[in-house]
Amino acid sequence: MLEAAARVEWIVCDNEVEALHLEYNLIKRHRPRYNVRYTDDKSYPYLALTVAEEIPRAMVRRNPRKDGTRYFGPYAHAYAIRETLDLLLRVFPVRTCSQGVFDRCRRAGRPCLLHHIGRCAAPCVDKVSPDAHRAPVDDLIGFLEGDTDATLASLEQRMAAEAAS
C-alpha cells in the first residue's frame, strides 16, 4: 500500500467520535482497495421511513436495505437518533410501532400508548386514514431533507395560538 500511494492527506477532527464518523463516510464514498470494509465493522444507525408500506412507519435501523425505505443518517450514536426521533414525533405524529403491535391494536380496536401521549395519529384504529397519515410522513421527509420553513412557521403559529389562550 505504501508503494502505491501517491500522497498522504490529514484531516484533523475534534474527537474520536467525529474521526470514526469521518472514516466511515470516507470509506463508503471512496471504497478504497485496501480498506473495503469498515475497520471495526461497526454499523451506524439510520432513521428509516418505510414509505413503500401502505401505512408508513419511522424506526431506527442499522443496516440499510434496498426495500423502498427512505434512510437518513448515519448518526454517530444510537441514543442521539432515538432522542431525535422522539422529538420529531411531537411535531410529526408518525407510526413507529412494529407490524405485530399495529395488528394487535387493530384487532383490539384500541390504539397503543403512543397515541394517548400524542406521538402517533393511530392509523391502526382508523383515527386517520392511510392517506391522511401519509401527510405527516411526507412532511417529516421534507423536514429531514432540509425544507424546514413550513414546519417552523407551523410551530410558531401553534405557539402563538397557545400563548394567546
Image: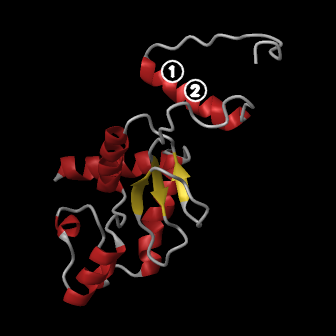
Image position of 148 with respect to 39: above or below: below
Q: Toward which corner of the image does residue 81 lie, by quadrant?
A: top left
Q: Position of residue 66 (x, y in %)?
A: 61, 62
Residue at the image point whose x is 17% and y is 67% from the top: 113
Secondary structure of the residue carrying tag 2 is helix
Residue designated by label 1: 19
Q: Position of residue 59 (x, y in %)?
A: 39, 58
- In this picture, residue 1 sits left or right of residue 134: right
Q: Name the amino acid type tagged 1.
A: Ala
Pick the front one: 116 or 132: 116
Q: Are the residues at dot 1 and dot 2 in contact (C-beta closer than 8 Å)?
A: yes
Residue designated by label 2: 23
Pick the front one: 18 or 83: 18
Q: Name the amino acid type tagged 2.
A: Glu
Can you say which quadrant of the picture contains the N terminus? top right
Residue 127 can be seen in this image: no
Q: Position of residue 49 (x, y in %)?
A: 48, 60
